Each structure stands twice: as C-alpha cells, then as structure tokens.
Image: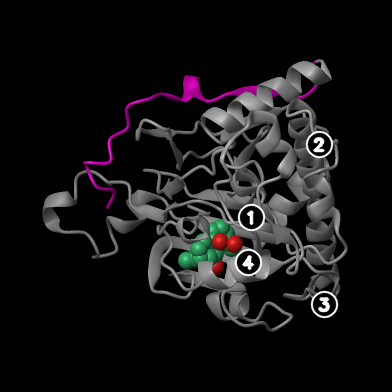
Amino acid sequence: MVKESQNIVAVDQDIPVIDMSLDRSRVSMQMVKACETIGFFKVVNHAVDPDVISRMEQEAINFFAKPVLEKKSVGPVVNRPFGYGLKDIGLKGDIGEVEYLLLHMNPLVLSQLSFGNDSTKFSSAVTCYVEAVKQLACEILDLTAEGLRLPPHTFSKLIRAVDSDSVLRLNHYPSSDQFLNSGATKLSDMSVSLPRVGFGEHTDPQILTVLRSNGVGGLQVAFPDGSWVPVSPDPSAFCVLVGDLLQVLTNGRFISVRHRAVTTEHASRLSMAYFAGPSAHAKIGPLPAIITAADQPRLYRTFTWADYKKFAYSLRLGDNRLDIFCSC
Ligand code: GA4
C-alpha cells in the first residue's frame, strides 16, 4: 500500500505541457525550464504517427493477455532483468504490482524478437515504435541543447551511436480492486481498494525517458519540495523524464526526476517507456561548456555508462545512484 506520509500536495496543473508545434526557440526555452525545475514535462503535437503508437499498444495488450507460460517464452532468451517479469524488479529484491516486458533495443534483439504465432507483427510494431520514439527523444534533446546554447547534437549524438544502449519497457499494472477478491486484502480494507505500489519511487539511470500510457492514471512525480504530483493520463501526449546521466552531463542543472507508479481503483494501466541510453563505453561527465559558462564547480567525476549500470544494478530501486559519482 502507498504510505500515508507520502502526501500528494501539488496538482497536475503544475506539470508543464509543451506544444511542440509552436515556435522552436519558445519550445526549447520551455523544455530547459521544465528540466531545471522538475525534470519532467509532457509534450503534445509531437510528430509520432498515431498508427505506430496504436499498433504497439495493441501488440502490448495482446501480449499481456497471454498465459504466463507463453509470456515467459518471449525470445530471444535473455537473462534477467530482460524478458518477461512478474512483480520482481531489478536484481535486489524489489517488488511491485506490475508485470512487464523489458527489451534491449539492439538490432540483434529486434531481429530475433518472437512470441506467439505471428512474431513478425510483434517485432515490426516494436521496431517502428522504437524508431519513432528515438527520433522524438533526439528532437527533444536537440531542443534542450539549443536552449542551453550548446551545439544542437551534444546530447542526441550519444543515443544515435550505433551501439547505444537503449531499452523498451512495456508495463501492465492491474487495477487496485483486482486485489479485493484475491484474498490478499484484510477484511477491514474490503470496502475500498487502496492504491498499491506498482513501481516504487526511483530515478531513471539513462539520459532521457519517453513514456506514454493508456487513459489510466497512476504515474506520480516528485516535485523539488517533496510533494508527489499525480500525472493525469493523456494517451495523445508523451511524458518526458530527465535521467541520471542528463543530470550529470548538465552538472546538476537538469534534475533527474523521482517518480513512481501506483495502481488505480477500477482500471488497469498500460505504459510504454523508452529509455535512451548511450553506448556502454561512452564517457559521461559534466560538459566543460556548462561548467565554464556558469562558472560552477564540477559536481560529478567522469565515468562510463557501463560502470554506472553495474553500480545501479547493485543497489535497490529507490537508492540514490549518483552520490558516489560526486566529485566533492
Ligand atoms: C529504472 C528504469 C528502467 O525501468 C530500468 C530499471 C531497471 C530494471 O527494472 O531492471 C532497474 C531500475 C531501472 C533502476 C535501478 C536498478 C535497475 C531496477 C533496479 C533496481 C530498466 C533501468 O534501466 O533502470
């Protein structure tokens, strides 16, 4: 159950919604402001083809409707954390009310992706969707770089690299009232279905996350004052989250946002998150241009994404992963 102390104070109106069809310099300034203040915003009027989205969403719905054994057989066979997962998150014992499919986005995985009888339909939906959201992530990164007066491809070149390490996650959260009849709820709780933690609070390790969901709420983001803000669902929008690496690259100017997902009373939620990461050997550290422009002390030392990931998987979901990379 979600703890009562974790109060929700701010409201969704405080979440920036950025219209990407507006003037480029205005959009880039709005994005920079959102990344600096919350590390989270929504984009509307993006260029992602609605057909590409609905094909992917339909394939995800079909996938989660299959029996567990079939879901577990999704190929290529890979080790945890990749593949199908039920409740277990990461490698250190974190649990959530969620089932998911975690796919590494390298060309080999995409070419061998198979499940069920019509595997080409599934892999083609994934390939098109990932191509489209990667394009969107690059566009957003270019806009933020421009807003920071950096060369436009400063961030996007990291995720455009041929061996970039990006991940697609399909999440299916059951409704809260699914637990009412399951015997898992105490008698005293039976009249209301309280929200449960679907995916515990954490920051995303990568550079940028581009996420969407069906019309069911459940995502909450932490504001700098510590309040949790529920994000109202909008299937036509994408949510954009600053990841740990972008916080490091900007020397802390952008905030890697803490967020979590909780279950919703009557409906199950389907979300699709694309985590844009660099190549394993990419060196990540504060950009010299940012430090000198603002005459700021350097907050982080330089490390490789491979080092960072190894460390991330040695910790629990909610742990702070950036502290040991501080240069202080
Ligand atoms: C959070 C963002 C992505 O979902 C993810 C997650 C990963 C996992 O589920 O295997 C992690 C988590 C995420 C952060 C810390 C580590 C790694 C679980 C965990 C405890 C796929 C990712 O890249 O990092």
- Amino acid type at image mark 1: Gln
Q: Does the stretch in magenta take in 195? A: no
Q: CA distance from mark 3 to mark 1?
A: 24 Å
> Under tag 2, what secondary structure?
helix
Q: Between marks 1 and 2, how big is the CA–CA gap? A: 16 Å
**Majority SS type along the magenta span:** loop
Which image quarter: residue 233?
top right
Real-space Cα separation, disc 3 to disc 2, in angstroms: 31 Å
Three-letter amino acid code at disc 3?
Gln
Residue 193 appears in view: yes
Around disc 3, counting alpha carbons within 10 Å, would you say few (fewer than 14), some (14 to 19), or many (20 or more)? some
Q: Which residue is located at x 28 percent, y 41 percent?
A: 6
x%, y% of residue 151? 85, 36
Q: Nearer the viewer, mark 3 or mark 1?
A: 1
Compare residues 231 and 233 and report the one nearer the observer. Answer: 231
The quarter of the image that holds ligand 1 is bottom right
Q: Position of residue 269 (x, y in %)?
A: 51, 48
Determine crowd level at label 4: few under 14, some 14-19, many 20+ residues with C-alpha closer than 10 A.
Answer: some
Residue that mark 4 sits on: 102
Instruction: Please give the range of residues in magenta.
Output: 1-22
Work out whether mark 3 precedes mark 2 in sequence or the reverse, and give the earlier one: 3
Q: Nearer the viewer, mark 4 or mark 2?
A: 2
Residue carrying label 1:
206
Name which of mark 4 and mark 3 comes first in the sequence: 4
In front: label 1 or label 4:
1
The residue pinned by badge 2 equals: 142
Q: Is mark 1 within 8 Å of ligand 1?
A: yes
At mark 4, the secondary structure is: strand
Earlier-in-chain disc, 1 versus 2: 2
Cα distance in 3D space between marks 4 and 2? 27 Å
